Image: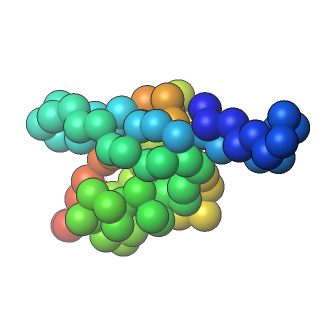
């Protein structure tokens, strides 16, 4: 957390840090410096992944591309598979 203080008064609070991402399949774990709250869409962009090709899960809940993630979150990113 970063506090912005001007003349003794707190004028802003920003959460900074990283999210922990486990890639599925494979199980590789990466930490992404998000600097603060970011959308799932932005997180995937930073990972070099497309919104259409991956699903992000936090605590068993599937997140939409508009949902936000925060520093300290632990996520799983699943590759979407289709076929017949």
83 relative to 59 in the view: left or right: left
Q: Residue at x 15, y 34 (%)?
A: 28
According to the image, what is the colour scheme of the structure? Answer: rainbow
Q: Residue at x 83, y 42 (%)?
A: 7
- Give the x, y percent position of residue 59: 53, 28
Whether residue 18 is situated above or below residue 40 in the rendered picture: above
Q: Please indicate, yes or no, whether residue 75 appears anywhere in the rendered image.
A: no
Q: Can you name the residue that lies furthest to the front here? A: 7
69 relative to 21 in the view: left or right: right
Q: Residue at x 49, y 29 (%)?
A: 72
Q: Quadrant of residue 83?
A: bottom left
- Give the x, y percent position of residue 25: 17, 40
Q: Please indicate, yes or no, whether residue 34 appears anywhere in the rendered image.
A: yes
The residue nearer to you, when weighing 61 against 66, is 66
Whether residue 30 is situated above or below residue 43 in the rendered picture: above
- Give the x, y percent position of residue 69: 55, 46
The residue nearer to you, when weighing 76 against 34, is 34
- Give the x, y percent position of residue 62: 52, 45
The residue nearer to you, when weighing 6 against 26, is 6
């Amino acid at each position: 957390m970063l506090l912005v203080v001007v003349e003794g008064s707190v004028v802003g609070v920003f959460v900074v840090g990283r999210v922990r991402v486990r890639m599925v399949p494979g199980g590789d774990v990466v930490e992404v410096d998000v600097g603060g709250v970011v959308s799932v869409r932005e997180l995937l962009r930073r990972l070099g992944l497309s919104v259409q090709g991956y699903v992000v899960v936090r605590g068993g809940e599937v997140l939409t591309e508009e949902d936000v993630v925060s520093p300290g979150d632990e996520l799983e990113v699943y590759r979407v598979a289709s076929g017949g």
